[in-house]
Image (spheres, rainbow, N blue to C red):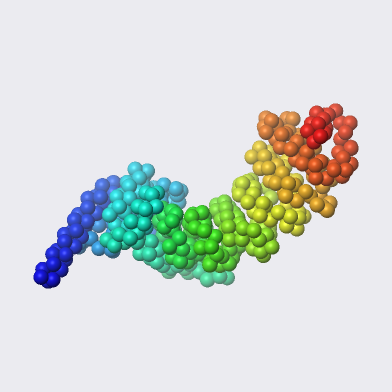
Amino acid sequence: MNFTKENCQFRKMLSTSSDLHGRLLRLSEPIAEILRRTQYTPQESSKVSTKDILLSLLPNTSSSRLANEESIKSLALACALLASSRSSTHELLSWIPENLSVMGESTFWEISRDCFSDFSSNSNAEKLVELVEDSEKIEMLPIVLPELKDGIEKSSLGKGSDAEDVSAAMARTPVGYAILAAHQLRWFVTQVKKPNLVKFCNLVVPCALTALDHWSPEVKGQGMITFVHLAKNVSSGDLGLYGDVVLDACCQNIASDDEIWIHVVELSVLLVTKIHPNNPRSPWYEKIMNEMLGHLERQPRNKERRITWLRFVEPLLNSLGLFLLAHFRRIFPLFFQWMHSDDAETVLLVLERLETVVRLTWIRHSPVFPRLVDELVSLYKESSMRKDRDDIRPLILRILMLLRQCKGLRFESAWSQYQEDPNLSTVSQHIWTSSS
């Protein structure tokens, strides 16, 4: 009796596996067809053919008729590679047409409903628990992440390596494989949201750290995007176990290529303010701030670099509070230079961050105060010739009013030289009327 029951279960398992294999074939056939028709000539220097890799991952009629973990994983990796190309301009992925990327993504979600417990677009908490507890489904991240980590690691280097080491590593394993694996890593992880992602921190963090430690900026960038998503979807307590290691990796990468500067700034600010939310005395605040300011000082006229920093730094400023006073000698020379930039975005962002700094510190015991008033007045006058003056001037007035509020007699003394300036009569009237 038991034998008959077990035999029936075995036959059912074989039948289900065979049906799933047929479904995987049907789902992948349109992808394979478009892929074969798509023109693609890999660059000789890359030594990697993305098209060949994709075709090798797709199931075919000659493979085993039973769908197993390996065949499901391969198709999932192919889908992730296709889907990740939608947000990439890298030569290894930019040739993939939009319709093929969309097809890869939709195919992944088709098979995920049958196979994966850790991927779900359903936000209902009970349904999520039900999916995770479904014993017939598999968790995909524990299967793919070790393989992707290995793919990234093969062309990585130890710290202190030089250009010759990079050449040797590329000869051993072309960096293209690491770039593709990093894109797959980023895509897989960013598809998993709360509350599922927390279960995989111990897998995601080592894999993303491997990407951050890689010498290729493209690989680093994908690792940073992965960490940003992780930090936004798990608690500070869950990240705290890896805090020092991850923050150290951030510091090591702040002086990075401009193409990934946006990611390293966003990640560094997000992590330090999340892991140490009410502890501006943490040495990580000083380390990260000093590294960022040093990178900005090396090329203060770099527009993209300064705009990125000004966009993302606000939470860091708020967390530092009065501890910002220790950074005045480095922050204000940059602010004074950027206030007179040609582009409106820089000027507006500087004024917004400047208002934050004044509000948090009240410019206590700082010799920077008189020059700050002078620079604001100078910018107010300059703005008369700018088309964006209606955006710039209200911000200047707000800062001047805040300075009068916090500095009192010192402000009146600094302003006395402008009291009779006919070009500033409306400014004086506004400051004193509004303040009173």
- Whether residue 299 is visible to the viewer of this picture, yes or no, is no
Q: Residue at x 54, y 60 (%)?
A: 236
The image shows residue 341, relative to residue 153, as above or below, that is above
Q: Residue at x 36, y 57 (%)?
A: 129
How far across and how far down the image is residue 242, in percent?
A: 53, 66
The C terminus - image quarter:
top right
The N terminus - image quarter:
bottom left
Q: Residue at x 67, y 58 (%)?
A: 289
Residue in the foreground of this view, choosing between 126 and 136 = 126
* Displayed quadrant of residue 243: bottom right
The image shows residue 225, relative to residue 161, as above or below, that is above
Q: Is residue 367 left or right of residue 168?
A: right
Residue in the foreground of this view, choosing between 142 and 157 = 142
Q: How many marks?
A: 0
Residue in the foreground of this view, choosing between 338 and 121 = 121
How far across and how far down the image is residue 269, in percent?
A: 60, 55
The image shows residue 145, relative to residue 105, as above or below, that is below
How far across and how far down the image is residue 35, in percent?
A: 30, 49
- Whether residue 20 is visible to the viewer of this picture, yes or no, is yes
Q: Residue at x 41, y 47 (%)?
A: 86
Q: Is residue 164 left or right of residue 147?
A: right
How far across and how far down the image is residue 255, in percent?
A: 61, 59
